[in-house]
Each structure stands twice: as structure tokens, then as C-alpha cells.
Image (spheres, rainbow, N blue to C red):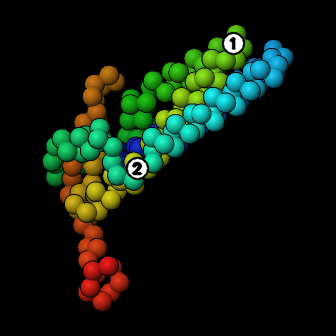
């Protein structure tokens, strides 16, 4: 699976998990007839989580951990095994586990999925620009990065394969730099 697509899918899955957890928290709170205090709590927490996520994700360049991961990618002339579903589950199992656990505990304590939704909001917003940074590096260097298959719990490794280099020096067609 291409690393940029993996990052994009991670953001979308985190946003989906946040939505599911928020929905379950609100439904469970309605069933338990929790008052305005709960609604104020979740509104403040989700707003704060959104602000934190936007602030952490404000950079258009790759974060240091992603830059380090790209820098340590091994070169190859052949593509690694591509199985997106297995790759996502293999790498994002903590997100799946916390989402299922949060949904399962919702009717005991609606605060649990409400808090978990806030952390998923932070994660989704913090990583929202990283796929664009990786694509820019791929276009600049004429390579593509793929996630290498590994067991859960092992550090992620990338494979760098030749790609198409983009010449940005003549974007306006006159031969002059933009």
C-alpha cells in the first residue's frame, strides 16, 4: 500500500471512529438521561480536541517522525506485497480496539466513548496534511513510498521504489521559474 494512501486512510478512519464514538456517547447519555453537565463537558472537550488537532496539524511539511521514516526507507526495484485491508488492520489495530472498546463501554459510562472520540478528533486533525507532504516529496524525488508488510507491534518500515519525477521549473510554459 502506498504510504500517502495509508496516511489518508488513517485520517479518514480516525474521523470515522470519532464520529461513531461521539454518536454512541450521545445516544448512551440520552438513555441514561444525563443532564446538561455531560453535554457541556463533551462540547468543551471536543472543541478543545479540535483546537489541539488543528494546531498540531498546521504544518504543511512532513513531521519529524514521518521524515525519519521516509529517510530510512530501503530502496527496491519491485513493489512490496499490496494488500490494503490487511495492511490497515495490521497497523491500525489500536484504533479498531479502542473504538470497539469505547462503543462496548458506552452504556456503562457514556463518558468513555466521549473522551475517546476527542482523542480520535485530535489524531485525525493532526495528521490531515501529512499525505500531501509525502506526495510532494515523492514528486520532487521521483520515487514512491510503500508500507512494507510487518507483524503488528513491529516498527513500520517503508520501501522506496522508482516513480515519476515532476519537473516544476517550467510550470508556466515559458521556461522561466515560477
Q: Mark 2 — residue? A: 59
Against 109, residue 43 (above or below) is below
Query: Which residue is drawn at the image coordinates 26% and 73% (left, top)?
Result: 167
User: In the structure shown, which secondary structural element does the residue marked by tag 2 occupy?
Assistant: loop
Q: Nearer the viewer, residue 121 or 150?
A: 121
**Which quarter of the rendered picture does the C terminus lie within?**
bottom left
97 lies left or right of 22 = left
The reply to whether callout 1 and callout 2 are in contact (CB within 8 Å) is no
The quadrant in which residue 120 appears is top right
Q: Please determine whether, in this image, residue 140 is positioned above or below residue 146.
A: below
Q: Which mark is residue 139?
A: none
Name the residue at 24% across, 66% down.
165
Q: Position of residue 66 (x, y in %)?
A: 30, 42
* First reached walking from the N terminus: tag 1 or tag 2: 2
List the residue tagged with mark 1: 109
- Taking 89 as reference, is 12 left or right? right
Q: Is residue 82 among the parts visible in the rendering?
A: no
Residue plotted at (28% across, 57% down): 138
Amino acid at each position: 500500500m502506498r504510504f500517502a494512501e495509508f496516511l489518508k486512510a488513517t485520517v479518514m478512519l480516525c474521523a470515522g471512529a470519532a464520529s461513531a464514538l461521539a454518536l454512541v456517547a450521545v445516544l448512551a447519555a440520552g438513555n441514561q438521561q444525563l443532564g446538561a453537565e455531560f453535554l457541556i463537558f463533551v462540547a468543551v472537550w471536543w472543541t478543545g480536541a479540535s483546537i489541539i488537532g488543528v494546531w498540531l496539524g498546521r504544518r504543511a511539511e512532513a513531521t519529524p517522525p514521518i521524515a525519519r521514516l521516509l529517510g530510512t526507507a530501503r530502496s527496491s526495484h519491485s513493489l512490496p506485497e499490496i494488500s490494503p485491508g490487511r495492511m490497515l488492520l495490521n497497523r491500525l489495530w489500536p484504533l479498531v480496539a479502542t473504538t470497539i472498546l469505547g462503543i462496548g463501554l458506552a452504556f456503562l459510562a457514556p463518558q468513555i466513548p466521549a473522551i475517546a472520540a476527542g482523542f480520535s478528533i485530535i489524531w485525525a486533525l493532526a495528521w490531515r496534511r501529512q499525505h500531501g507532504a509525502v506526495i510532494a516529496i515523492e514528486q520532487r524525488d521521483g520515487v514512491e513510498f510503500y508500507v512494507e508488510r510487518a507483524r503488528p507491534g513491529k516498527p513500520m518500515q517503508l520501501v522506496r521504489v522508482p516513480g515519476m519525477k515532476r519537473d516544476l521549473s517550467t510550470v508556466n510554459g515559458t521556461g522561466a521559474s515560477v
